[in-house]
Image (tube, rainbow, N blue to C red):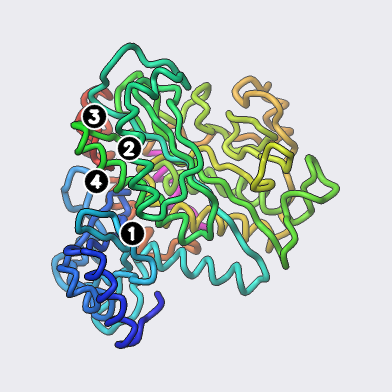
Amino acid sequence: MPVLADEELATATARLQDAGIRLLSGSVVDPAGVIRAKHVPARRAGAFHAHGMGASPSWNVFCVDNAIAFTPRFGVVGDMRLRADLTAVRVLGDGLAWAPAEMFDQDAAPAPVCTRGLLRRTAARLTEQGLAARVGCELEMVLTPRHGPGWNAYGLGALLDVEAFVLDLLAAADRAGLPVEQVHAEYGDSQLEISIAPSDPLTAADHVVLARLLACRVGRRHDLAVSFSPLPFAGGAGNGAHQHLSLTRDGQPLLSGGTGPHGLTDGGGAAIGGIVAGLPELTAVFAGSVLSPHRLQPGHWSGAFACWGWENREAAVRLCAETPGNPHGASVELKCIDPSANPYLATAVFVELALDGLARGAALPPEVTVAPDALTPEEAARTAAVRLPADQRSALEMLQGSEPARRLLGEEILEALTAVRRHELDTYGGHDVDAVAEQLRYAWSV
């Protein structure tokens, strides 16, 4: 994390106070995908950045229901420091500002369990290899209670029913510097989606947290609750948190301008090959909650199969080729991510899988041009299309036995992540999905 000098800290603090800020919130996202924060008066912003606020190691094993999944490494003994990154602070208005925070130990060393720190290291590896990545996010949410007539997917009237909320959300986004590119009524009842402009990986993950914060804050003003659950209502549409990734090397795109399928370069094909190959073992990073498997189903446009295809919304990896209708250029969209994922961890692993494919010169699997569940066994074998783990237990077992997971996440993050997800499995795994969806409907809200 960039460390500001004393003079820079004084200037940053003065700017916050001059802007009428009275309270600064600094947040991290825990392995369960829940946003947790410390808050200080604005005059203490410098201390929040330079020294941090204390947090027990148990912060890393808080669960979606506020239980604590203690492990040998994460218990009641010890202390960590949450340090706010004042280079990324955003003014939210009405006296409040927000900054992403990172975890350090008492000796000011970055904590290995910090997922924002992991993503920062991934970004550094991109630079070392002459690569640059842009990540854009799509975040779905369900508003409750619903007002007005019946909801029509992508309907104009459906959006007008929540017009005041949407307009206030866009105003809040402008004020906070969140670059929203699109907002629309999604397929699910009372479901909205906002698309966020591409940026560097670290900023993109910060934007996901900021978007969730703004949506929930604006919702309160309209007597609306906002759910980011992978399955807000049993039998209803799930919420996704898709990510788009584009890659360049020395300024040249890897996903277009080549001689491969749909203009892929050899490097772009290798990157896709790395992502597809790594998804089954790492599904628990992207869609690891107890409710995630109920969304990650064939026929739900959720990317339930590890395969790729041009504009194939049923494939886990959807290639968006460079065309006149795609102003940001070619990208790959990861469909299987849902909002229960830690966005820093998910972004880091998404990029790392692409980097691994590049390093290995991974083969690009044959393209899947139909819904993957329609493939015959022979076609599935030819395209190497594999169903992602269909239940949470399988996803966790694959994660725990995965050498790539241990290498990419590190022992600390892997231990914390499996502990909190095991708690979900043990506590809710055998319960009726209706009851679990109701209990956890707002677990990932702010």
Q: Front-most of 235 and 332?
A: 332
**Which numbered disc, 4 or 3, marks the residue that appears first in the sequence?**
3
Residue holding disc 1: 415
**Residue 345 location, x and y as percent?**
42, 56
Tag 3 near tag 1, CB within 8 Å = no
Disc 2 crowd, CA 10 A, few/some/many (<14, 14-19, 20+): many
Question: Which stretch appears magenta?
Answer: 393-404
CA–CA distance in space, label 4 to label 3: 19 Å
**Amino acid residing under circle 2:** Phe
Q: Is residue 384 left or right of residue 230?
A: right
Is residue 394 in the magenta section? yes
Q: Which mark is residue 436?
A: 3
Residue holding disc 4: 446
**Residue 297 location, x and y as percent?**
47, 26
**Amino acid residing under circle 4:** Val
Q: Which mark is residue 228?
A: 2
**Residue 9 location, x and y as percent?**
30, 81
Secondary structure under badge 1?
Answer: helix
**Which numbered disc, 2 or 4, marks the residue that appears first in the sequence?**
2
